[in-house]
Amino acid sequence: MKKAIGIDLGGTSIKGGLIDEGGNILKKAEKDTLTANGRYEVLERISEVINMLMEDGVMGIAIGSPGFIDSNEGKVLKVGGNIHDWAGTKIKDELQKKHPNMSIFVENDANVAAICEHWKGAAKGYENFIMLTLGSGLGGAIYIENHGLVRGHRYRGGELGHAIYIPGGKLCTCGQRGCAEQYISGNAVENAYEEKTGIKKKGRDIFKSISKDDIANEVIHSFSQNLGIYITTLKNMFDPECIVIGGGVINSKEYWWDDTIKSFKNHSNDSEDIDIVPAKYLNDAGMIGAGKIVFDRLR
Ligand SMILES: [Zn+2]
């Protein structure tokens, strides 16, 4: 049986899966990312997760990473996402030293999630779709049939979280001001709540408390409004058949989904003929999509 190791690198944890050609997860492994200690510690921990999953029949390894990713050279470009010291990391070259006999691939994490959803999940059967990943940040992927993922001229395409949403607004991790990610993401919700109350609370707890906490309610309503407006913009820019929304924040969708769709319908010039759906593979999308990359590229 052919197998692949798919790694989902996030700001808090490194999740790995041993994946078969049907997209089934045969085995899982996980470690904390510990980003504070810099890139070499993170690379070492990725390698440890790989070793925990390695066995006979593994054809290759793929890593879904935050940041702007040159998927040809397998390295992080100028923006490293939510991982400290990650910009500029040559992921493929560094991991190749630790796993010399393996084929190694690297791709942007939102692109990996889109690959999974198109293969087996909510985007299956769609010829063109947009994927948004709402985690601590806002990731994006654009998929067009017969072309595949839109990577752009220098691998900076599809970074939908860095479209400027409020000119001159909050400073983003990418260096710009007013990026969509600063208003539509898990961190955005946490920051907005902290600004209004002085209290640092986890996103999922803020979502849970909307019925009894007026400030939480206000913050979440503003988040849903913004997301609905942003989906309107995406529809007009790309006219996709479908928009899939995934990422950790989708686990709290009961608190914001309906409000978001209402906002989209209120703001859009034409809200028909587009499917807006939650992702199917939430926590596992990264490892399954990464596994698919290995099978596709080694075919
Ligand atoms: Zn940005």
Image (spheres, rainbow, N blue to C red):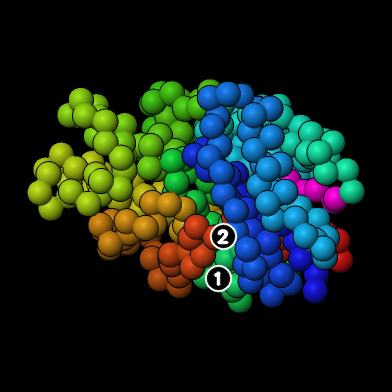
Residue that badge 2 annotates: 285
Instruction: Compare residues 159 and 80 and report the one nearer the observer.
Output: 80
Q: Is residue 143 above or below residue 197?
A: below
Q: Majority secondary structure of the magenta segment? A: strand
Q: Nearer the viewer, residue 35 or 289?
A: 35
Q: Where residue 250 sits: x, y (%)? A: 39, 57
Cβ atoms under marks 1 and 2 closer than 8 Å = yes
**Amino acid tagged 1:** Gly
Mark 2: few/some/many CA within 10 Å (<14, 14-19, 20+): many
As drawn, 125 above or below 50: below
Residue closer to the observer: 228 or 193:
193
Q: Is residue 175 left or right of residue 216?
A: right
Q: Number of labelled discs? A: 2
Which residue is at a point 32% across and 59% down the rendered structure image?
Answer: 253
Amino acid type at circle 2 is Ala
Where 229 sits versus 35, above or below?
below
